[in-house]
Amino acid sequence: MKLRIVPIALTVVLSSVVLFGGWFLYQKLAVQSPLHQIVSTYDGVKNAHIDIKQDTVNLKLDLEPDTNLQGLVQKIQQEGTSVIGSKELKIDVEDHSSEELNEWWDRAMLSVAEAMDNRQYTGIQTSLEQLAQASPHLQAKASIDDKNVYVSLSDGKSAKFIILPRQGGQMGVWNHV
């Protein structure tokens, strides 16, 4: 019995193309496309890049300054459950902040961190409002859900979106205490 190399190699190559091509089309059309449709139709989303891995769904978002980030996350979690399932949703918002917003956030960070640490979440909005009074064109908003605190800063032209997890991990330096 003489094995012919060309037909065997051709069969292996064609089978691989069909198998991986079918998997790729399934990922694009049945998994990523519905989630991309949910995200891209939300008001304020300029662009979205979705990367679905075995146990995580990574979203890289480009948002307009007045976008309701918490509302977007809720919509993704409600309408995208068939795609996300038990995977962890990780959101990365593209940074379009100005120097002034970064400086303002640096001043607000201490009081926000204290409120997060003490689980006094209403103190976040209070401290943001107090600091925003010094800059009349600055808009600061905080909202909360069961997993995160969402902070949005905007001066009309640029925006900074911060997602703070409510269940923060312990810092490594304190584990020995």
Image (spheres, rainbow, N blue to C red):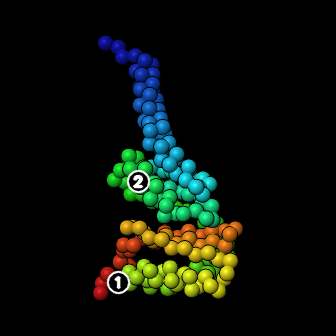
**Is the Cβ of the residue at disc 2 closer than 8 Å to that at disc 1?**
no
Q: Quadrant of residue 167?
A: bottom left
Residue at point 67% right, 81% down? 136
Q: What amino acid type should be assigned to the residue bearing mark 1?
A: Trp
Looking at the image, residue 82 lies above or below residue 92 = above
Distance between the alpha carbons at the discs numbered 2 and 1: 37 Å
Residue furthest to the top: 1
Quarter occupied by residue 77: bottom left
Q: Is residue 163 left or right of residue 155?
A: left
**Residue holding disc 2:** 78
* Residue 28: % across, % down: 49, 40
Q: Quadrant of residue 61?
A: bottom right
| Residue 141 in view, yes or no | yes
Give the percent coordinates (x, y) of residue 176.
30, 84
Please determine whether, in this image, residue 35 is positioned above or below residue 135. Answer: above
In front of the other: 18 or 114: 114
Image mark count? 2
Residues 15 and 124: in front is 124
Q: Residue at x 70, y 68 (%)?
A: 157
| Residue position for label 1 | 174
Density class for disc 2 (Cα within 10 Å; few <14, some 14-19, many ≥20) is: few
Drawn side of residue 150 relative to residue 167, left or right: right
Task: Relative to 108, say whether 84 is above or below.
Answer: above
N-terminal of the pair, mark 2 or mark 1, is: 2
Q: Quadrant of the N terminus?
A: top left
**Relative image position of residue 16 (x, y in whole percent):** 43, 30
Image point (35%, 50%), residue name = 85
Residue 107 % position (x, y): 58, 85
Give the structural element (helix, strand or loop) at label 2.
helix
- Residue 9 vs residue 60, the one in the foreground: 60
Residue 38, which numbered label? none
**Residue type indicated by callout 2:** Gln
